[in-house]
Structures are given as C-alpha cells and as structure tokens.
Amino acid sequence: MAALTDRQVAPEFSVVIPTYDRPRLVERCLHGLAETLSPGGGFEVIVIDDGSPEPLDPIAERFASQLDLRIYRQRNRGPAAARNLGVRVARGRWVAFLDDDCIPEPEWLRGFAMALDDGLYAGAGGLMVSRPDDSTFSIASNLLVAYLCDYFDNVDHAQFFPTANLVVEREAFLALGGFDESFRLAAAEDRDLCDRWSEHGLAIRVAVDAVVHHSPKLSLGSFVRQHFNYGRGACHLHEARRRRGVAAPRVEPLRFYSGLLLSPLRFHTERSPLVMVPLMLITQIANAAGYYAERAGALGRRRSPPSPATDSSVSLPRPVRAEREAPTSAPPSPPHRPRPESGPTTADARVG
C-alpha cells in the first residue's frame, strides 16, 4: 500500500498524470497508485486536469487519506503543456509520467528506483502490458509499442519511450525546456523530448520491473484515428527537427516493416494473429495518411499570411489541495550538442 509522504519533506518521486474529461479512468488509475508500494523517500501524485468540462474535486476528496495527491486545473492546452505544469509544481527529484488509462503494478516505482540507483542515468522507461479483457484494438496498440521497443532499445541504452510509463530527472527536464507545447495532440511530443534528451547527452535505460497495464478504450474508429494522429504528430516532429538543424530520420530497411507486420506471430497476445496482423497493417496505413495530410496542411499554412502574435503565457492554477506554489520559470536550456539522427519514421509518433 502507498504510504502518505511527510508533506514537509520532498518525496523522491512525483507521479504526473495529465487528463481530459476521463474521470473514471483517473479514478481507476489512482486506485492502482493507492496499491503501489512506496519506494525509499516516498512519492506524491499530481493530476493535471486539462480543462475538462467537470472538475475532479470529488475524486481528490476520495483519495485524500490514501495518497499525497494534488489536482491542478488549467485551460485546455494539450498533454505537453499539462505535463510541463505537473513538473513545475512537482517536489520530487524524479518525475514519473503516467497516462490516465494506465494501472501500475504494485512494484512499479520500486522498479524505477532500482533501475536508477546507480546514478548513471537521467531517465528510465518501463514496460506496458495488456490485460486479457482489454479490447483487441488496445492490445494491438500495446503490441506495436512492444515491437518498437524491442527493435530499437536495449536495456542500457534506449532511444524512445512513450510517456505512458517514463521517469526523468526533474532538474534535467526543466533545463532541457520540458515538452514542446506546440505539440497540441497526444502524438510525438514524447518522441521529441526523447530526441532532445539524447542530443544533449542524457541517457535513458529500460526498467524491466516498472510495469503498467495500459488499457486505452479503443474501437476500430478510434484506433484508426489514433494512428492517423500519430502520423500527424510525426510530421510535426520532422518540422521540429528541421528547425533544430537535425538530420531527417532514415527510412528503416524492409525487415523492420516485415517484422512489424509479423510481430503477432512472435509476441504472445490474447488474440489470434489472423486478427492482429491486419491491424498492424492498418496502423501503418493510418500513420502514413495522417503524415501526408498534416504535411499538405502545413504547406498551405506556410503560404498563408502570418497571424498576429498571441500571448501564450499561462498563470499557475491553484491546486485542489496545494502544499506550496512552485515557480513557473525553468532554468536556462543546456548547450546544444546535436548528434546524428537515427530514429525511424514509423516510431516518430507517440505510440503509447
């Protein structure tokens, strides 16, 4: 069971959960966190409500005796901005990003603590698994993540982890400038962060004992729309790389794509490969369609006259139960040290 942290002492971990209009999923996620075994130094939980129609105050009240919980509410600005706010108000050395459709296993944070104990890494990514009763489309999305991580990452050096299950050192995150808030969709903002993390010499490792059950509620329509948006995010990511002067990603060899399509034969799932293989193909078609649709739209916007500048500043909202106000400014960004780009086109979008 989670133990309440002494609120006069900063916890070791701050769990940040962005959400929009999914109170039942938030409550399910918090139930899981209430059962999480506390790592040394304890943990706090910060939920960022990204402008949902109804506030989450009743949920905060239900978990007040079980978790060191704060809920902040901001106008709708997307998950990147929501996570940045969560990091600004966090008190822990390590920030654990968790999605509202995830349920952590009891040893989740202890798994991260063990992976980061040697002091060699500024971040770590955990594993995402499905439950037998998840929808076929949810299982397919998690299978895609498993394939990409298996293809590109090894235990001591990882190129990418989705923010559904990722821990970063807070000070390093702030020095890097956090998430790029121009990524308004839940698509590729995490890949962009991982790119910049690597470019500045910061390392991420795999935390094999940090496991969450990732159970997005997907139908066929929302599954296709999800991967279409991932393609849109990939286009935005390529533009962000171009602005930084980073080389465009190389196209992966044919074995990458054949391996992806046939991954249901290699990775055990609760569904037949006869169902999963076509879904893997659909992810790639939808991804490509989203990418080229966004690219066509971007070209049209470039030809249009520029819009008047708007003030993008945002005041720090008051939490449902605040311990203290956190500073809104971040330390200066570290010096830029670009490295050759090697990320795949398929993995450029958020896939969690």
Image (cartoon, rainbow, N blue to C red):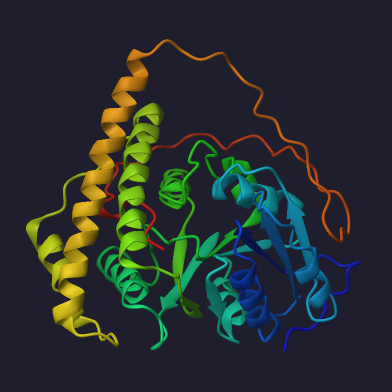
Numbered-mark total: 0
Residue 145 found in image quarter: bottom left
Left or right: residue 7 versus residue 51 is right
Left or right: residue 82 versus residue 115 is right
Indicate whether 244 appears above or below 15: above
Identity of the residue drawn at 37% across and 78% down = 135
Identity of the residue drawn at 29% across and 88% down = 270
Identity of the residue drawn at 33% across and 62% down = 223
Left or right: residue 243 versus residue 67 is left
Residue 289 found in image quarter: top left
Residue 132 position, x and y percent, is 38, 89
Residue 229 position, x and y percent, is 36, 49
In which quadrant of the rendered image does the C terminus lie?
Answer: bottom left
Indicate whether 308 appears above or below 314: above
Residue furthest right as drawn: 8
Instruction: Decide if residue 191 is in sight here.
Output: yes
Instruction: Decide if residue 248 is in sight here.
Output: no
* In the foreground, 304 or 234: 304
Residue 36 position, x and y percent, is 66, 84
Identity of the residue drawn at 15% across and 68% down = 261
* In the foreground, 333 or 42: 42
Residue furthest left as drawn: 254
In which quadrant of the rendered image does the N terminus lie?
Answer: bottom right
